[in-house]
Image: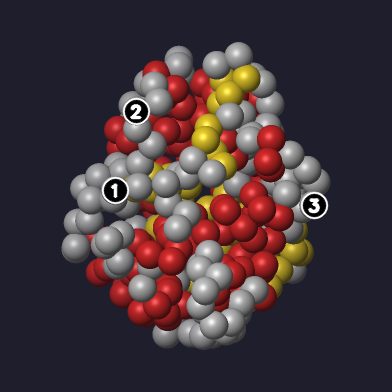
Amino acid sequence: MKHMKRMILLIFIVFPLFLFNCKTTGNGDNNNGDGNGNGNGNGNQETEAIIIDHTCTDISKIPAEWINKVKQLLNIHYAHTSHGEQITVGLERLSQANAAYTMGIESLPRAASIYTFWYENCNIPSSTNHLTMMDGQYYDNYCETYVTPDLYWESSYGMNVTRSVLNSFDVNVSLWAWCSQQDYYSQAETQKYLDKISQLEKEYPDITFIYMTGNAQSEEQNRLNRNNQVRNYCENNKKILFDFADLDCWCNGQQHKVNGIPMEHPHYNGDQAGHTTFGSCENKARAFWWLLARMAGWDGN
């Protein structure tokens, strides 16, 4: 059973050759980066890049059968620092809320949420009734849930920790979330991230790796450039991207900018969880469910 979900997931992702329609276009901001994002990128290839952004949050559009497919097929390995808690907190809140609320349809009768979520620190739960997630890195009998770049991809040690997790636990999806490193990382440092994740893709072709942008909480041109570098790379190399920064900037159909730089929307300014509001956490969790449903085989319509 250890590799069964991995094989089934590959069948859904590779063979249907889906074209994703959730993609950030038209605002021109992706042209500000000084990195073209081109690379070999020969890992798990799609026919088109998978870009999950602010247009991918209406989970009422996802049929229940695909929510159930996610629970049956996907086991997530997620490594992050405090900002990354936004996704896990949001998933927990959707799981605990009633279905009418989480779908945004107040006229529906109140019922238990279908977005059930179960995660454990440094272990993957066994369940087909929940979205299952392993939170953190585990190596040599030590569990670390505050995972900095050097503990996942940036150092040889971190790469070996990640390999140990992927070799030892029944996961078929893996991702790492930025803190605020993109405020000051150079083009070369960001390219190293892209190269290392691509390297893991090549080493583990039966595991799907999700790339991420950093948050959008600072008024830093470098931060925008580095996030655009990640976006361009994913577009050019047909990768899967969870655009964390774009989700920060949009609320109720409006994008917030300061001096022309997209920034976290004022509606999300707060520190209820992961340096933001519960609303921002839930918004990212909805986008995460959208991503996983597409990975499980939903066509997005």
Q: Amino acid at mark 2?
A: Gly
Q: Residues within 10 Å of mark 3 (few under 14, many from 20)?
A: some
Viewer-nearest residue: 75 or 51? 51
Q: Amino acid at mark 1?
A: Asn
Asked whether disc 3 touches disc 2, contact meaning CB atoms under 8 Å apart, the reply is no
Distance from label 3 to label 2 (Cα)? 32 Å
Q: Is tag 3's residue or tag 2's residue first in the polypeptide sequence?
A: 2
Q: Is tag 3's residue or tag 1's residue first in the polypeptide sequence?
A: 1
Mark 1: which secondary structure? loop
- Residue 286 in sight in this render: yes
Horizontal relation, residue 168 to residue 198: left or right = right
Q: Looking at the rendered structure, which numbered label has been put on residue 26?
A: 2
Q: Residues within 10 Å of mark 2 (few under 14, many from 20)?
A: few
The image position of residue 183, as x and y in percent, is: 65, 25
Q: Looking at the rendered structure, which numbered label has been put on residue 272?
A: 3
Find disc 1 in the rendering and name its residue.
Answer: 21
Distance from label 2 to label 1 (Cα)? 14 Å
